[in-house]
């Protein structure tokens, strides 16, 4: 399949509307559920209920009606209505500060990605071209199922920027390697500070989520080891892989192209492995900067409306590792629908009502997902014309 066909198929307009429909639909359902939620709060002056510990666990569950009993007088708790919850959301200077900081982290995520792509292309791409590449890459990721991600299209995006396809593929392999390396290194660090039992949502099947999480973790560990071998130890590995695949009857029509790509990847890998240690440290730090910014968007949004301590912020960070994995295995475009639902379920224990968490889930996606759909759709025609014009000049 040609480069132009791959790109045109990846950016079909119906995929944009499907992603918006799923994301907004699930977010809307969560908001409706939040309005119907029963929530109890302490009120010693006009309370209508008393706590009876309905499940006999010695803990107050403010969202469980069985925990409370209605009384005519002397109550310590009352039902909090949805309107009361909305009235509690106040836009203070601190709220605006944390919201603006969340936007800074959104920008920081893409800035570090641009920095990384410039490092990997040895400044062949200008900052302007890097911006276009990252926006197209994010656009492709937003429209691709989590299990595929935008990496499958990224090599063709780089190729349109006059980077040889083999080298483009090698760059995508390195970015995938670095992304997964950061992920598998961060998880043990998080577990130093939080208990693994706190990581998984109490209102979902914890054992099921834990199984998916740890299975995914070891799959990504395997990917990291494979890419490490292909880049640093045995550069001929991808080439041999393509040679084997090209012998399969189903892929024989692409044999010539696959053999060429395999040889180009091997050549690029041999060039990259000669890079000094400081080069790889810079690439990893730019990766860490991008992913840290990505995670801190949610922390800043929560802090805008819920006052969290340091340990709670670490807990939120740990829960995002689960959230990211669930998005990666999602069959929907950019994890749309799955992301919003998992956000609400995973962070329900952090604090605040279901309604507030649902609102924050929608805000999070409006800030860190939907913009790429609209920016990408706006820039795509301009980018295609520019790359076609540049290729004709050559």
Image (cartoon, rainbow, N blue to C red):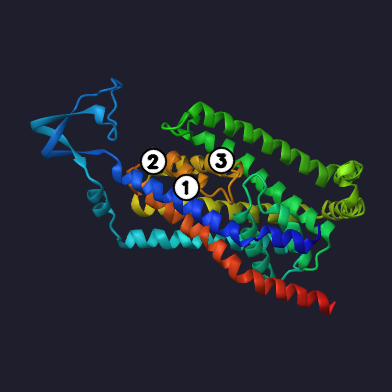
Dot 2 or dot 3: first in sequence order is 3
Query: Marks 2 and 3, how far apart in space?
Result: 19 Å
- Label 2 Cα neighbours within 10 Å, binned few <14 / some 14-19 / many ≥20: some
Q: Evaluate if marks 2 and 3 touch, with contact meaning CB atoms under 8 Å apart.
A: no
In the rendered structure, find residue 326 and report the number of the disc placed on it: 3
Q: Is residue 356 left or right of residue 294?
A: left
- Label 3 Cα neighbours within 10 Å, binned few <14 / some 14-19 / many ≥20: many
Determine the residue located farthest toward the front in the rendered image. Answer: 14
Residue drawn where x is 87% and y is 54% of the image: 261
Element on which disc 2 rests: loop
Dot 2 or dot 1: first in sequence order is 1
- Label 1 Cα neighbours within 10 Å, binned few <14 / some 14-19 / many ≥20: many
In the rendered structure, find residue 350 and report the number of the disc placed on it: 2
The reply to whether residue 235 is in sight is no
Residue drawn where x is 62% and y is 43% of the image: 183
Query: Marks 2 and 1, how far apart in space?
Result: 16 Å
Element on which disc 3 rests: helix
In the rendered structure, find residue 250 and report the number of the disc placed on it: none
Say which of marks 2 and 1 sits in front: 1
Residue drawn where x is 45% and y is 34% of the image: 201
Element on which disc 1 rests: helix
In the rendered structure, find residue 340 and report the number of the disc placed on it: 1
Q: Is residue 201 left or right of residue 244?
A: left
Say which of marks 2 and 3 sits in front: 3
Q: Position of residue 226 (x, y in %)?
A: 77, 40
Query: Marks 3 and 1, how far apart in space?
Result: 11 Å
Q: Position of residue 136 (x, y in %)?
A: 65, 63
For residue 343, above or below residue 20:
above
Give the quadrant of the N terminus.
bottom right
């Amino acid at each position: 399949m040609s480069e132009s066909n791959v790109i045109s198929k990846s950016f079909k307009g119906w995929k944009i509307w499907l992603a918006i429909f799923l994301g907004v639909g699930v977010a809307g359902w969560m908001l409706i559920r939040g309005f119907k939620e029963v929530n109890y709060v302490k009120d010693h002056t006009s309370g209508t209920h008393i706590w009876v510990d309905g499940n006999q666990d010695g803990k107050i569950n403010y969202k469980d009606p069985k925990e409370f009993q209605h009384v005519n007088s002397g109550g310590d708790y009352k039902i909090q209505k949805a309107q009361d919850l909305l009235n509690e959301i106040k836009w203070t200077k601190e709220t605006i500060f944390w919201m603006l900081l969340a936007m800074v982290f959104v920008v920081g995520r893409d800035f570090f990605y641009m920095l990384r792509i410039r490092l990997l292309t040895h400044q062949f791409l200008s900052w302007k071209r890097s911006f276009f590449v990252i926006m197209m890459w994010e656009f492709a990721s937003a429209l691709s199922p989590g299990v595929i991600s935008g990496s499958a299209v990224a090599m063709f995006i780089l190729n349109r920027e006059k980077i040889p396809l083999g080298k483009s593929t090698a760059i995508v392999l390195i970015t995938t390697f670095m992304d997964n390396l950061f992920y598998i290194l961060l998880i043990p660090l998080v577990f130093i500070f939080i208990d693994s039992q706190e990581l998984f949502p109490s209102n979902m099947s914890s054992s099921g989520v834990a199984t998916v999480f740890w299975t995914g973790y070891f799959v990504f560990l395997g990917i990291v080891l494979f890419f490490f071998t292909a880049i640093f130890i045995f550069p001929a590995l991808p080439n041999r892989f393509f040679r084997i695949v090209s012998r399969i009857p189903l892929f024989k029509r692409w044999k010539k192209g696959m053999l060429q790509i395999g040889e180009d990847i091997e050549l690029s890998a041999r060039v990259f492995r000669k890079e000094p240690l400081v080069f790889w440290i810079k690439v990893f730090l730019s990766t860490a900067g991008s992913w840290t910014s990505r995670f801190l968007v949610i922390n800043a949004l929560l802090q805008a409306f819920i006052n969290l301590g340091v340990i709670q912020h670490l807990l939120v960070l740990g829960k995002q590792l689960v959230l990211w994995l669930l998005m990666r295995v999602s069959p929907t475009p950019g994890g749309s629908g799955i992301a919003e639902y998992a956000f609400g379920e995973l962070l329900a224990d952090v604090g605040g009502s279901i309604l507030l968490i649902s609102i924050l889930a929608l805000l999070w996606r409006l800030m860190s997902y939907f913009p790429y759909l609209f920016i990408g759709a706006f820039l795509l025609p301009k980018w295609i014309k520019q790359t076609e014009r540049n290729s004709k000049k050559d």
